[in-house]
Image (cartoon, rainbow, N blue to C red):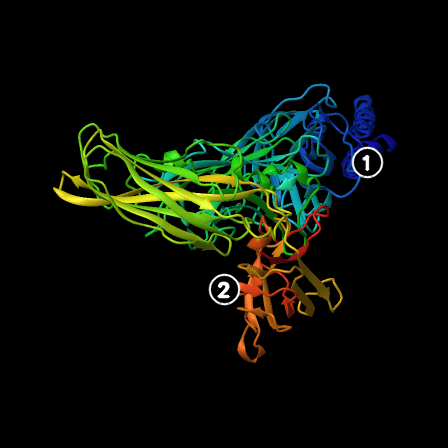
Amino acid sequence: MLATFVKVLIPVIVISLRALLRGFGLRTRLAVLSLLLYATALGLGAPASAQSLPPNVGSKQLCQYEATPTACQPLPGQAQFGVVYSYEFLVDASLFSGNDPAFPITEDFTNFTPISPNPVVCTSDNWATTFTPNIQSAGPPMLLDLNVTGGQIYSCRLSGVFTGFGTNALNNVHHTGNPEPSDTSERLSTPLPANPNLDADFILEKTVITTPDIDISSGPATATFEITLTRNPNDTSPAVVLGPYFSVFDEMGLNLGSVPLSAVFQTGGFSCDFIPGSNATSTAQSNVCTPNIAPGNALNSPGGTGGLVEFEFPGTNPTIFLQPGDKVVIRFDVEIGLLPNTTCVLSDPVGAYNRAFLALADGTTALNDTDNSNNTTLDVALNATTGISFDPNACAQPTGGGGTGSGTPPPDLKLTKTVVNSQPTYAWNQPIRFLIKVENIDPTDSVYDLNLTDIFQNLAFTPNFDFTVSNVSIVSCGSGNCVLNSWFSGTGHMTSYSDNEVVLTASIPELPAGQSAEFALDITPNVPICDVSSSFPDKFIQNGVYTTFDYIDFTTNTRVGAFAATAVQVEMEPVPPCDIEVIKDILTPPAIEFGARTVYEVTYRNMGARTLTIGTVIDALRITVPNYANSMDVRYRYDCMDNGGVTGYSTTSSPGGVYLTGSVTYTSQPNQGLRLIDHPGPVVFAPGSMLRCGVELIVEEPDVNDPYCFSSVQDMPFIENTTFMD
């Protein structure tokens, strides 16, 4: 009786214990089940034919990932994004008496991306050796075939990374064909962090793949840029998910004094590739981002920006996690050209610049780039190396910028401007001789109706001065038909930044192939009374020349217009500083509060004994860090009054004291900012005279969709207000 009772009871105990032992380690379960099987072998169990049960799938748990698996190590805390974890489950065939070479298993999961190429490994000897099951479908759900031998217990691990925020990652596993699991040991729910990690160190680099000097005189030219975004290999913070809240911006801009240009993004040359680092568990992917091109491509405002492109990362499959050493490489083409009715006259040798920057925000969390010092392209001082500079000689040859013909290309016309007896700096009150040379270096074709215009120009921070023009002459004329049409006579006045005068015009009806013409003129800059911008040591003036001309388009036998241009700058000797004074008094708390009034008073004063004519009397506002905000709306107004000795100024910004509106942006120079006070003409200050202006200012907070919607703790946002009297 007792023996019969034990034989019936033992199988029940085995089945029950198999369920109860699922929470124990593999070694414990094997030991207990082995004892029970040993008891059965002694005759205490049921006959073998009654013991065979199908393999049982379950005992689901989450483990730390190990390249060489050992016993499951539980997570030390909440699961993180970008970290590889392993789902472990058991296939218990200890009571299975047969063999199944393709035991089917279904593992379903959410918010989880398996690693590749071998996401699943299994063992039957407590990880002493491993093997890879046959994956019928990567899923989800993933369908596996496992070669099962009776009497064994198998442990399998599916490894991957979590995706999705503020939710739970679900995983269940069961014998394929059986109902969905109701046994809790076959199901697992893992809570995931509510927000992506945005606390990391990125290295942002920008290079020009094509030569930095491009020729736009014969029409638009294309420059190829490359942006490389790299996770610092030494960064220890969690991975950053490449997703919809992750954006890289790129924009074109003009340096102070540059002529207007156009910048057109070329979709045909675009690529965006993910390149994993040496220790990454992910694989390379292409086309991981798409360009979102902002409307408008005209770069009309020197110091301003335009041509904004946002590179958006809509999400990838499989999900990309930027681990230390990983990088994203974006390459694209920008077509640079002259806007209609402009010349290639160069006021600034740097011309246009190109800058890349990051914006990562998920609506509540913003990027903290823990080290901005390695973001080289965020530094405006690197514009010359990260953007495009225009070589004056290249800009003049070959010509045709603005030409309308599409058949025969224009002849090669070379226009140069040089200074005789060039020297580092030039003395005031001494003539400077400029030579203009135009050469038709085309081997066969003539050019016709050349009309040259020579322009003398003041540049930023050079004090106002008078000048005269003398000794205007034709040095040589190969065709013998050069004509001086006009030249400047009398005394000219440079009264503000970038003030200019036409000092010479000439014409050549025809310039045959291989011939040239040369003109000369002397310009004498008179010494300024004093220097109102003595804190800016370099004082430059500029002489530029451009010519329009025609050539024959032999495909249509018609004339086509084109042009060429160039310029040269010379540095003048320093001038003693002016005896002037600018005082600013802040009448409200100095810290700007968004939406609240800031009131201050500016006083301009001539403290000397001579009357001063001041061409620049302005008050400008700018953002001093490049990655604080793209723009902020500003409302402002001012009223001015003098003590009786100042003329030529505006008494108010608007009749009735109505607020004017504008936008404050990041600029590289203070004078490029939003001008709150900007008197239209020269303001004359008698000896001892004073002009006092009261300013009211309201700055609004950045728009919630501002692409610069983040702030690094190492870059305190400052709004700088600067007053100029020049």
Q: In this view, does 694 lie above or below 203?
A: below
Mark 1: give few (<14), some (14-19) or many (20+) Cα within 10 Å.
some
Q: Is residue 62 above or below residue 707?
A: above
- Whether residue 272 is visible here, answered yes or no, is no
Q: What residue type is labelled 1?
A: Leu
Q: Which of 111 and 487 is in front in this view?
A: 487
Left or right side of 641 for 207: left
Q: Quadrant of residue 726?
A: bottom right
Q: Which of 669 and 712 is in front in this view?
A: 669
Q: Name the residue under label 1.
A: 9
* Dot 1: element: helix
The residue depicted at 57 percent of the width and 53 percent of the height is 529
Q: Nearer the viewer, residue 342 or 419?
A: 419
* Nearer the camera: disc 1 or disc 2: 2
The x and y percentages for residue 572 are: 53, 41
* Dot 2: element: loop
The x and y percentages for residue 585 are: 72, 65
Q: Name the residue under label 2.
A: 681
Residue lying furthest top:
129
The x and y percentages for residue 590 are: 74, 63
Give the CA distance from mark 1 to mark 2. 108 Å
Q: What residue type is labelled 2?
A: Gly
Residue lying furthest right:
2
